[in-house]
Amino acid sequence: MKNLFLLFSLSILLCCKNNTTQFDNAKNCVEVIMKKDDSLGSIRNHDSKNISLSKTIDKYTLSVENLNFQNCSKNFKTAFQNHLSAWKNMKQVTDNHPHLRGEMHALFDSIKKTNDSLAFSNKLDAIFNTWKEVEIAKEPFKVSE
């Protein structure tokens, strides 16, 4: 009976340690992704000075998709996938403006003044809303930006 109790206690300790390790791995994954996305986002915002908005979006989304999300939580992965999908959907509008060049947000202001204004605003809202999902998904890990 004593051995059974010892075995049971040991299995609980190992289980708890494993859960802590999984949490720490997920937290580290979220931290790395958020830092890399911050850097890639900064690059994205200025790439449109030299290449079209659609190509800029392609470059950004491909770069983020190539990051290692393996240890991240399922909620965080899903939220980020939704965010990248929202960016890709923005191309339905930016494809109509292949010659625009400049800082991304300045170009967004230009598109707001075109016939694509409504569609653009809807796509931009989706980007902002999915980013809020990313922010919520990272909250359990207490990761700051």
Image: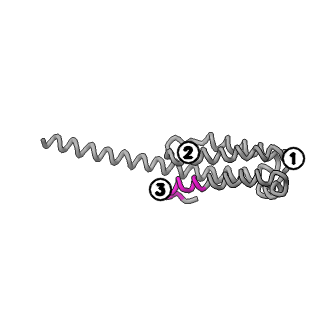
User: For mark 1, what is the residue?
Assistant: 99
Instruction: Examine the residues drawn in magenta and state their main secondary structure.
Output: helix
Residue 28 place in picture, x, y as percent: 50, 50
Q: Disc 2 vs disc 3: which is toward the camera?
A: 2
CA gap, disc 2 and disc 3: 15 Å
CA gap, disc 3 and disc 1: 42 Å
User: For mark 3, what is the residue?
Assistant: 140
For the point 37% across and 45% down, the residue is 18
Disc 1 element? loop
Disc 3 element? helix
User: For mark 2, what is the residue?
Assistant: 78
Q: Pick whichever of labels 2 and 3 is earlier in the sequence.
A: 2
Disc 2 element? helix
Residue 52 place in picture, x, y as percent: 81, 45
Disc 3: CA contacts within 10 A as few (<14), some (14-19) or many (>=20): few
Which kind of residue does numbered mark 1 sit on? His
For the point 39% across and 49% down, the residue is 20
Q: Which residues are magenta?
A: 132-143
Which kind of residue does numbered mark 2 sit on? Thr
